[in-house]
Image (cartoon, rainbow, N blue to C red):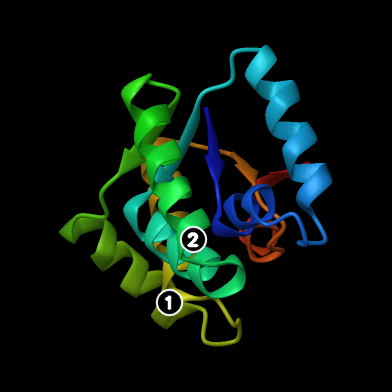
Amino acid sequence: MIFVDTSVWVAVTDKADQHHLEASRFFKQRMKNGTRWITSDYVLSETITRIRYNVGHRLAVEAIKRFNRAAGLDLLRIVKIDDPLRQEAEKIFIRYDDQLFSFVDCASFALCIRESITQVFTFDRDFQIMKFTTSP
């Protein structure tokens, strides 16, 4: 299972994004291999907002439908950031005052740690700082 970050969801949706082709190719390749994906409700919230601002409401709505469809087909697991994960995210956020981690990233780190996920599909270098293996 690979955790998918906001930067990837935005890149796949926004054809003008600098990582669009790379993200799309990686997704297609891994889907053929049966890869399952995991993300969080925080990441999806951030993603839908960024898509709305960058490329418009229609594509944001399409993204919501795509996420729901993938979750319904058991291709995407969407984890709700519950109180224990949020508290772990707070600890990470407080501890790393020398980094510019977003709170959503801290929640993602906490989720990956809890679920023993080491592989993250992202264009965000913050995951490398936290010693996750990133793709592509």
Tag in front: 2 or 1: 2
Count of numbered circles in the view? 2
Rendered position, 75 above or below 101: above
- Which residue is outermost to the bottom? 97
**Mark 1 nearby-residue class (10 Å; few <14, some 14–19, many ≥20):** many
Residue placed under numbered mark 1 in the picture = 93
Foreground of the two, 26 or 128: 26
Q: Which mark is residue 117?
A: none
Q: What amino acid type is highlighted by mark number 1?
A: Phe
Which residue is depicted at the point 24% across and 67% down?
87
Q: Name the amino acid, label 2.
A: Thr
Q: Secondary structure at mark 2?
A: helix
Image x and y of residue 135, in percent: 74, 42
Q: Quadrant of the C terminus?
A: top right
Q: Give the alpha-carbon distance from disc 2 to disc 1, as whole Å.
A: 20 Å
Q: How far across and down, in percent of the image, does residue 92 sit?
A: 42, 70
Secondary element under disc 1, as helix, strand or loop, is: helix
Outermost residue toward the front?
58
Query: Which numbered disc flags the more N-terminal residue, 2 or 1?
Result: 2
| Residue position marked by numbered label 2 in the rendering | 47
- Residue under the point 53% across and 41% down: 3
* Residue 14 vs residue 11, the one in the foreground: 14
- Front-lying residue, 89 or 80: 80
27 is higher (above) or lower (below) than 99: above
| Contact (Cβ within 8 Å) of mark 2 with mark 1 | no
